[in-house]
Amino acid sequence: MRDVLEEENYQVFCASNGADGILLNEQKNPDLIVLDLRMPEMDGIETLRNIRKADDNVIVVILTGYACPDTIRDASDLNVSEYLGKPFGNNELLDIIGQAFEH
């Protein structure tokens, strides 16, 4: 994913878990976050709750292979811009990110 985004001239920062993602958000103040719901240590919803405490305006795209209605509702309540189901192709990723920036 990083390579695909960098080829499109996006500056990319990666975190391996939710806690690192929260810290990276505070340090880098990104325009957009691509967030997986299934991560070690802290799930995507809890990570997003923490990110929203610091920044309610950052654009968030959720990646998931496990989209249950409760999880989607929780994410929607936290102002998620777009969802992308796994597996996905490079063009789908770029399209969703483009759509997220348009909102």
Image: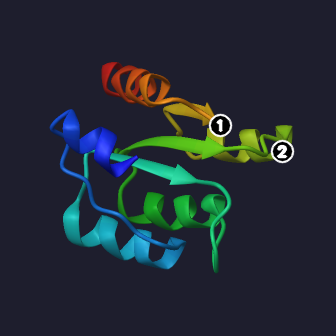
Q: Quadrant of residue 91?
A: top left
Tally of numbered discs: 2
| Point 31% across, 27% down: residue | 101
Q: Secondary structure at mark 2?
A: helix
Q: Residues within 10 Å of mark 1 (few under 14, many from 20)?
A: few
Q: In this image, 89 relative to 25: left or right? A: right
Q: Looking at the rendered structure, which numbered label has been put on residue 70? A: 2
Viewer-nearest residue: 80 or 4: 4
Residue picked out by circle 1: 87
User: Residue 71: image x %, image y %?
Assistant: 77, 47
Q: Secondary structure at mark 1?
A: loop
User: Residue 15: image x %, image y %?
Assistant: 41, 69
- The Cα–Cα distance between marks 2 and 1, rounded to whole angstroms, is 21 Å
| Point 73% across, 44% down: residue | 65
Viewer-nearest residue: 79 or 10: 10
Q: In this image, 46 relative to 91: left or right? A: right
- Front label number (2 vs 1): 1
Tell me the amino acid under the disc marked 2.
Asp
User: Residue 31: image x %, image y %?
Assistant: 26, 45
Q: How are the residues colored?
A: rainbow
Viewer-nearest residue: 44 or 57: 44
Tell me the amino acid under the disc marked 1.
Pro
| Point 73% across, 39% down: residue | 72
The quarter in which the C terminus is drawn is top left
| Point 66% across, 66% down: residue | 43
Q: Looking at the rendered structure, which numbered label has been put on residue 47? A: none
- Disc nearer the start of the sequence (2/1): 2
Q: Residues within 10 Å of mark 2 (few under 14, many from 20)?
A: few
> Is residue 61 depicted above or below 18 in this figure?
above
